[in-house]
Image (cartoon, grey):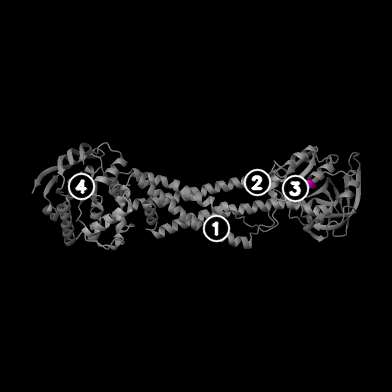
Amino acid sequence: MNSVIELQKMNKIYKTGEIEVHAVNDVSFTIERGEFTAIAGPSGSGKTTLLNMMSGLESSTSGSVILAGQSIAKMSASDLSDFRRDHIGFIFQSYNLIPVLSVQENIEYIMLLQGIPKEERRQRVSKILSEVGLSGVEKRFPPQLSGGQQQRVAVARAIVSHPDIILADEPTANLDSKSGSDLLDMMKELNTNRGVTFLFSTHDSMIMERATRLITLHDGAVASDVTK
Amino acid sequence: MIFLRLAWRNLFRNKRRTILASLAIGLGLSAVIFTDALMGGITNNFISTATGSWMGEGQVHSVGFRNTQEIENIIKNREKAEKILHNDPHIKSSAPRVISTGMITSPTEVQSVLLAAVDPQQERTVSRIANAVKEGEFLSSAEGREILIGVKLATVLEVEIGDKVVLTAAQAFNGELAQEMFRIKGIFDMGSRDMNGSFALIPLKTAQKMLNLKDGIHEIAFQFKDIKQSTDTTLPLWKELKATGNEPLNWGELMTELSTMLEMTDFALGLSSLILFIIVSAGIVNTLFMSLYERMFEFGVLKAIGTRPFQLGKLIVLEAASLGAISSLFGMLIAAGILLLTSYTGIDYRGTEFVSVAITDLLYPVVQIHQFIIYPLGMIFFIMVVGIYPAWYAARITPATAMRKKL
């Protein structure tokens, strides 16, 4: 097996007083290493909740997640943090870089938590910035960069520690179409050239077009799962 | 190191809020430092006034004399007691006294007085009463018919320098009344109503003859070279004096009201510091929670990308510590400025009387190193402790909840 993620009968029910909302309904699928997959669906279809559950950011009501061969169900909060740090890269809709850290420090952050020596960190930062087309901005701070540049730094931060999978939640939502398209091309290159596994949550047609597999959610359940 | 860097930089994301919060906390700290220094000044002033004006830093009496003031109850083994004091390396000076009550009569008035008889030369080395003479002069000799009275008593008796007054007191051993005429040599102002209104000073040998005491005395007042030694009850001096059959006491034991008041002052300072720290802590929790709420999404992201709950908590405690460090710096600078100023100008509470001790000199704050080490470090530690609550809150919130910005 070369699967990165295995979801089995995932459910998430939110309770508001007497009312129960089934945000995710009996979802099962597997993501193989090297996939460039998009989970699509309208707002409220459960895309983000599913992404949160598979990364341990949020607990599921039932079902299991096996990520990189390990079940995350019974991990403590600290173990989950370490697990995410070592196995998952995150890209968020609004970039979410740490504004008080420079580009270099932002990218180094996860490696610092991993205890990687300074020299190796610097080498990796330099290499990854070159790959995402941002050489020379190491000392700048996020507010000094454009939205597209910030999202590229976020991609660099996500992949620099060589995680098993990148979870990208609406990564192009805050970008203009040109920047979004460039970013997706860059991600696709990373997928093709380095075999980085991407899983998107999106309703952006550009992502859906580029994705090699498209899982569509409707009312929390898998409506279709198409490999192109 | 990354968390310390993050904490420090985070603190300056909202410069105005950080500076205002630091100034508020710093003002609180400066108030504690200044109050401590001022209390030190008041304590020193009170002790030096109480011990220096008349009482001395220690006294020797015959056992029981302080309660009954019986004129026959003179100091036992006077020579031995005086020799102990003279030879002790910690003692600067001592002076013998006769103490009695009596009546003082002027041509117009009669007043009861506490009579103290002294050797002027020795008395000058123990008390400041010679310096308190406002009119006339201090006693010139241990013999003669000179008398010194307070300004209030002079007013009541309607007497001036050179006027005659008659002292009446009971003699020792036979109980007969003795009367002697004295001439007003000086009028003093000790700042204390008791001393100015009912206290008279006459030459020692004259009093001994008048009261039939021969060579007897009732009191030896003494001063230490260093006032701190006066309350050191482990000094052999106290045992040696006790062995003479007398009762040696330090100023704290002689003026229990004063030492109790000073203890209460320490307690009040501690209590007010605690209250101030609690008020400050409410401000800190508020500041930290405001900052926390603003950055809740960011904390969710930090957790999502691999920051452990403990590390996130540590970050917030370090932010609190950084806030404490800046606040302490502000506090120390403000306190140093106020202390520098008041060290030059002094604080005028002259004329104020408390537990029969009048403040006669300007108050000067006492600056001690602990005020600029213990209090700021205590403040930083306290702020860090206060920061644990928001830190714990942020540490236990799930990343998804944080990213939904739900508090």
Quick check: A218 left or right of B52?
left
Which one is in front in this view, the residue at disc 1 or the one at disc 2?
1
Residue B88 covered by magenta stretch = yes
Closest to the observer: A1 or A54?
A1
- Callout 1: SS: helix
Q: Which residue is drawn at 41% across and 50% down?
A: B318
**Residue where numbered disc 4 is placed:** A165
**Residue where numbered disc 1 is placed:** B335
- Tags 3 and 4 on a common chain: no
- Callout 2: SS: helix
N-terminal of the two: label 1 or label 3? 3
* In the depicted structure, whether residue A23 falls above or below residue B5: above
N-terminal of the two: label 3 or label 2? 3
**Residue where numbered disc 3 is placed:** B89
- Callout 4: SS: strand
Kind of residue at badge 2: Met
**Residue where numbered disc 2 is placed:** B261
- Tags 3 and 2 on a common chain: yes
What span is in magenta? B85-90
Residue A80 covered by magenta stretch = no
Which one is in front in this view, the residue at disc 4 or the one at disc 2?
4
Q: Quadrant of residue B236?
A: top right
Kind of residue at badge 3: Pro
Which one is in front in this view, the residue at disc 1 or the one at disc 3?
3
